Amino acid sequence: MSCAHPHNTPPGSQVWLTPPHVLAALGPFDLDPCAAPEPRPWPTATHHFVEAPGEDGDGLAREWFGRVFLNPPYARSVIGNWMAKMAAHGRGGGRGIALVFARTDTAWFQRDVFGGADAALFLEGRLYFHHPDGRRARANAGAASVLAAYGRNDADLLACCGLAGRFAPITLPRFVPALLRRRTWREAVSEWMALQDGPATIEALYRALAGTATARRNRHARAKIRQTLQRGPFERLGRGLWRLEGTPCS
């Protein structure tokens, strides 16, 4: 879903579906705790709760699990409750992505996105949500949307999902402060790779080094990273997958 309430909502309409291209770029998910009622034209996750109390609800009261996709009700009176639970899910070791309006001035956005998420993707343009029968709305949502990622893996996925927009890391991983000072490309890449639990994707490396002094001095930073990997001491395990020589594969 979900129970999004765009500005251009026709009278009596309560349910708006997430555009399927957004789900295709981000999924699969384990749970949508605020899913559209049955019948659904497409699934948003393996498991669905609904907003209202009942056999498959109340999604806000039930325990969330796994990788969550949340497109909550946008009404001011309730959205903060849903986003607070999403942030708590992330802090508890869960992961997932929320789709909301880019209301950066609101208390819930400051608290649960800027203060709770690991990264955000501010989408280009305005989304067209869909009616419960799957038809795309004639008018766009009337405001800009943002995807907020909870958990480092989802932050990495969001950075490379292919949806048009501007990616913004929110939390700094533990290795970033050491990399913010000027250093060689080999030092920067080696330090980051040494801190990984196993092999890492080159997309994750791009994102990790984007804010360092080393990268900011060079507008061809990505090419330099690829060149550094080729020169070693790094081993290519597959397309876009690398490890520091001598470290375990998993």
Image (spheres, helix red, strand yellow):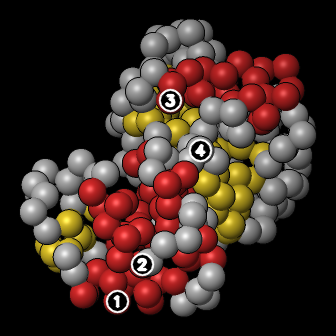
Residue kind at label 2, given as amino acid type: Trp
Q: Earlier in the sequence, mark 2 or mark 3?
A: 3
Under mark 3, the amino acid is Gly
Q: Residues within 10 Å of mark 3 (few under 14, many from 20)?
A: many
Position of residue 249 measured from the top left corner of the image (x, y, whole percent): 11, 57
The answer to whether residue 103 of the structure is visible from this angle is yes
Residue at numbered disc 4 = 171
Instruction: Compare marks 4 and 2 and give the one earlier in the sequence.
Output: 4
Residue at 69% of width from left, 38% of height from top?
A: 113
Please give the name of the residue rendered at 69% of the width and 33% of the height, measured from the top-left corner. 115
Mark 1 or mark 2, which is nearer the start of the sequence? Answer: 2
Judging from the image, what secondary structure is the residue with disc 1 in? helix
Observer-nearest of 198 and 96: 198
Residue under pointer 2: 185
User: Which quadrant of the figure has residue 163?
Assistant: bottom right
Whichever of labels 3 and 4 marks the residue nearer the N terminus, that label is: 3
Task: Categorize mark 4 by other alpha carbons within 10 Å: few (<14), some (14-19), many (20+).
Answer: some
Name the element at disc 2. Answer: helix
Pointer 1: what residue? Answer: 227
- Above or below: residue 213 compared with residue 200: below
Above or below residue 167? Residue 67 is above
Q: From what the image shows, is residue 246 above or below residue 214?
A: above
> What x and y, as percent, mark residue 213?
60, 71
Q: Indicate the amino acid at tag 1.
A: Gln
Q: Residue at x 49, y 11 (%)?
A: 62
Residue carrying label 3: 90
Q: Disc 2, disc 1: CB below 8 Å?
A: yes
**In this image, 214 relative to 153: left or right?**
right
Q: Nearer the viewer, mark 2 or mark 3?
A: 2
C-alpha gap between disc 2 and disc 1: 9 Å
